[in-house]
Amino acid sequence: GLPIDVEEGEKKLFGWISPPSHHRPNRTGQYLIVNGRPICSHPFSYAIKEGYSTSLPSNRFPLFVLHLTLPPNQIDVNVHPQKKEVRLAQEWPLKQWVAQAIQSALTPKQQQKPTFNYTPTYTPPPRMVQEEMHIPYQTILPTFRALKTVKGYIFVEGFLDAVPDTSLHLLNQTLAEKALLDHQLKDPEPFEREQLLIPITFTVTPQESLLIEEHHDTLHRLGLEIRLFGTNTFLVDAHSHHWEGKDVKGEILTLLETPKTAVKTFTNRQTPSPRRLTTTEAQALIDQLTRKEIPFEPPLLISLTPEQCQKLSSTL
């Protein structure tokens, strides 16, 4: 394993992580101890995977044994009845710090080969050439820049090898958000779940109870921590942000009307009428698509002709 030992103020992280060549199809083999207590934390696991960036294959998970020390006022172990979950007071900064620590541990080994091998006459291996030929959009995405937004669309500047005559494109916001959600759902555990201060309980018919139990894994994958809490009664003590403000019981029963298409139904119901994004939000959306290696091609991205660009130049 690769050792990690970082410290910042009252925060300390030490232990071992697996190299990018060692991974599993699930999160088994991930052990986290926070202030001396074994803990289960999906946000923490996600931050570690983010630290690996593109070093891991899709839908694979690293192994780790890590000890995290935090000031007592930054965690609350009493949120979950069994105290295996924690609520973090400053979750976002902590996740960034952890991801950076993982990147630092991996960087030395990853940088040795490119630094040694790169020369002006370097020729990529045939396999690499073939992959690059199949994803011309993805190789230039980091240069894309959001210029202007209207409701539902983003004007994007950047050159594509496949469309050399124009640098202006129109990105469909709704399709972009749906593409990100579809990509997330390829992950065995795609969504981070927030523990609820007040769990949700509801009662269903015996037939509905059997249906929910039968498709428990699907509901878990869609962001619900749900369990039987009595005769035909269920308790939800954590869920992803997709369920906020919704009639959880009603949504579950709607999805399970056609269990085989529950995931597709869930995706369609999560794509709201788009609002106009700020330029900063639009750029963040573009960057997410880039990191996930989602191809920028029709109908997601439409390249504008020089004539169309000229007509729109006054508005941009």
Image (cartoon, rainbow, N blue to C red):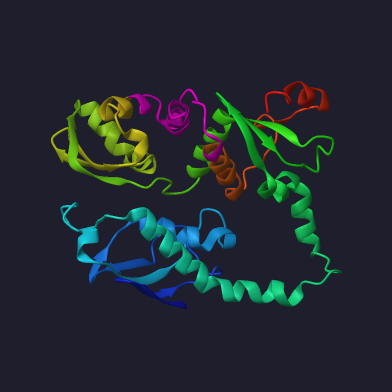
Whether 10 is drawn above or below 76: the answer is: below
Query: Where residue 107 sits in the image (x, y, percent)?
Result: 57, 71
Point out residue 99 in the picture as x, y percentages from the top left corner: 45, 62
- Dividing the picture into quadrants, the one containing residue 124 is bottom right
Front residue of 43 and 309? 309
Residue 164 place in picture, x, y as percent: 83, 39
What x and y, as percent, mark residue 97?
42, 63
Quadrant placement of the C terminus: top right
Please tell me whether residue 254 is drawn above or below residue 181 in the rendered image.
above
Horizontal relation, residue 169 to residue 124: left or right: left
What segment carries the magenta color? 254-280
Q: Answer with left or right where residue 14 lies relative to residue 276.
A: left
Q: Is residue 226 visible?
A: no
When the figure is inspected, residue 191 is found, relative to residue 273, above or below; the finding is: below
Q: Residue at left 31%, top 55%? A: 90
Q: Nearer the viewer, residue 250 or 243?
A: 243
Q: Is residue 46 left or right of residue 164?
A: left
Give me the residue at 81% from left, 40% from top: 162
* Tally of marks: 0
Q: Is residue 80 magenta?
A: no
Indicate yes or no whether the magenta region holds residue 275. Answer: yes
Q: Is residue 48 left or right of residue 305?
A: left
Seen from the viewer's position, the closer of residues 37 and 60 is 37
Q: Between residue 180 and residue 227, name the one nearer to us.
A: 180
Q: Is residue 53 visible?
A: yes
Residue at far right of view: 121
